[in-house]
Image (cartoon, rainbow, N blue to C red):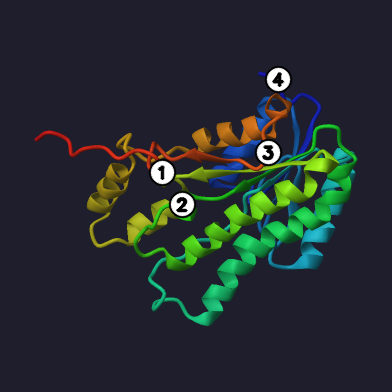
Amino acid sequence: MTDLQGLRAIVTGGASGIGLATARLLAERGARVAVLDLDPGDAPLGFTADVSDDASVRAAVAAAAGALGGIDVLVNNAGIGAAGTVADNDDAQWHRVLDVNVLGIVRTTRAALPHLRASAHAAIVNTCSIAATAGLPQRALYSASKGAVLSLTLAMAADHVREGIRVNCVNPGTVDTPWVGRLLDAADDPAAERAALNARQPTGRLVSAQEVAAAIAYLASPAAASTTGTALAVDGGMQGLRLRPAAS
């Protein structure tokens, strides 16, 4: 597929997990892709950026836009996780997660907007989460941040639709990423914890990063020109399905 041929894309958090899968898929479909990350690794067009620092973001976006010759697509994927109830995370951790997961999107979008306004195919895709639409145990802080991302996506879509900028988000279920792998490794019984996470999705398995990337690529594509203000669930049916217990 070459549905993104000639488009210029920025992916934050593009050095691993969902971001890496997205950057690779966008490139495969014809886009020129710049990766922004704390450590962009060996990305062909990588820029060091800390989304919690406005000066860092502005410098990286400007450099990426210069290298690409503009920006058509912004994928706001950078984010961090947190575990626990409201009693388990201190104020500093709340500030840190909200700063990265919510304000990180604000900073990157703010820096990219002048370039997106000049594009004939401008699209923003935010990585949200099933945690924005379903109550998950031990995820109070993370869920609060992703609930804010969902609301922010809708508000941004309303603000910029008349400028020709589409804004959508993807809501992944539990994705088989290095971050989830580290959570499993830290569990008392990693195998049992993985089995529980698999069972939480009606499909009976974790979502792959490539599956989320495919959804992001669709929303970024001109093929989705009439799609804005939408949250696309990529969660194995977790958000909408209520299955009866399997027969024993």
Mark with earlier residue (4, 3): 4
**In the picture, which quadrant includes the C terminus?**
top left
Q: Which mark is residue 66?
A: none
The residue carrying mark 2 is 133
Of residue 189 and residue 1, the one placed in the foreground of this image is 1
Q: Are marks 2 and 1 in contact (CB under 8 Å)?
A: yes
Mark sitting on residue 2 = 4
Query: What amino acid is found at the position of numbered circle 2 in the picture?
Result: Thr
Q: Residues within 10 Å of mark 1 (few under 14, many from 20)?
A: some
Task: Answer yes or no: is residue 40 visible.
Answer: no
Where is mark 3, residue-wise?
228
- Name the mark nearer the viewer: 4 or 1: 1
Q: Is residue 145 left or right of residue 248?
A: right
Of callouts 2 and 3, the N-terminal one? 2
* Residue at position x 77%, y 51% in the image: 159
Q: CA distance from mark 2 to mark 4?
A: 33 Å
Hey, what amino acid is under mark 4? Thr
Q: Is residue 104 above or below residue 153?
A: below
